[in-house]
Amino acid sequence: MQMDGDESSNIEDRRDDGAGGFGGGGFGGGFGGPGIPSPMGGGGLAFKGGFGLVAFIVIALVLGADPGALLGGLAGGDPSVQSSAPASAARPASRTGADPETQFVSRVLKSTEDVWSDIFRDMGRAYRQPRLVLFRDATRTECGVGQAAMGPFYCPADERVYLDLGFFDELASRFHSPGQFPQAYVIAHEIGHHVQNLLGISGKVQQMRQTMSKRDGNALSVRTELQADCFAGVWANRADRQRGGRMIDDRDIEQAMAAATAIGDDKLQRQTQGRVVPDSFTHGSSAQRTRWFRIGLDSGDPRKCDTFKAQQL
């Protein structure tokens, strides 16, 4: 993978800091891994009737339509894109570019900023750039204390992606997915959750989960995570085109597919508990994760990432 170009100014390095204290809210989405909790709390409207409405809302949001008229009395509050301002002021990055791994992360983040700014501009919207926090072991967030054991995750309350770089070592050694493109895919997946947050998708999904059974809530979480996988593929397509087709090659794609396969819920459950329980999936099976990443990668079109309407995942 050739990831050259500018670095993002939105890297926040906390690797020398300690953790402590709790914030409010709930985690908006994680990449997945053994021992990692479901990315969103349980809840929501039963799929019967309500699920079709969410699908319709999501389509409108992705296409850039105003969701307010569609939502009606479903939820209180302002559903506009600009309603999710960070809860705390941005903290200046302290060590951007201090080492090759940090530099790589910063360049990937900058690439996502360029790609999604263009996509949002095409939708008549302004893309609000997230921060990416590098930490070790644990760190405070507006969603509570984030721990490295959770894997990379996104907190919608402060619009930050949290990453312990040790996860990349685990990705290579434990999940047999070496290389930089799988690492970039991880970052792009979390940025996909930020996109969902800006479009109002995450908030509406969270609201629906509040009155759902655990089983239906898990199923809705899977669709949310698969859309983030698809958005990661959209980024890869667009970023590669911006670099004249020189950023990724077939080997990179194979490595990304291997990463998506390695952390599918079915494979992880089989490894950790010896059996597969589909009703407990929160991120999707290996086949589902690779399929939706590939849809985004092949199309470069976020409108193709309509996991909420899809009859077959």
Image (cartoon, rainbow, N blue to C red):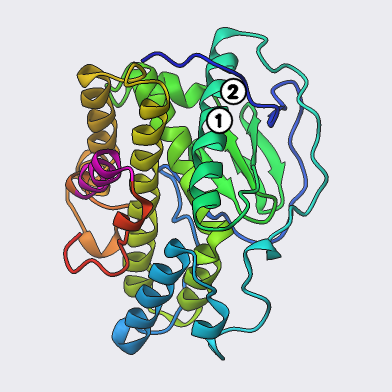
Q: Position of residue 10 (x, y in %)?
A: 69, 32
**220 lies left or right of 273:** right
Q: Please report the residue visible at 34 percent of the width from the left and 49 percent of the height from the top.
A: 301
Residues at marks 2 and 1 touching, judged by CB atoms closer than 8 Å:
yes
Residue 250 shows in this picture: yes
Give the residue number, with chain letter if any, for mark 2: 106
Q: Quadrant of residue 84?
A: bottom right
Q: Residue 173 in the image: state x and y as whole percent.
A: 33, 18
Q: Is residue 297 found inside the magenta-colored segment of the image?
A: yes
Q: Residue furthest top?
A: 99
The boundaries of the magenta stretch are 288-300
Neighbours of disc 1 within 10 Å: few (<14), some (14-19), many (20+) = many
> What kind of residue is marked 2?
Ser
**Residue 144 in picture, x, y percent from top left:** 67, 51
Residue 87 to residue 98: above or below: below
Q: Amino acid at mark 1?
A: Leu
Identify the secondary structure beneath mark 2: helix
Image point (36%, 19%), residue name: 247
Element assignment for label 1: helix
Point out which mark residue 137 bears. Answer: none
- Magenta-highlighted stretch: main secondary structure? helix
Residue pictured at 55% horizontal, 66% vertical: 200
Residue 109 is labelled as 1
45 relative to 297 in the view: left or right: right
In the rendered view, would you say 104 is above or below 242?
A: above
**Is residue 34 magenta-colored?**
no
Quarter of the figure with the C terminus: bottom left
Above or below 48: residue 218? above
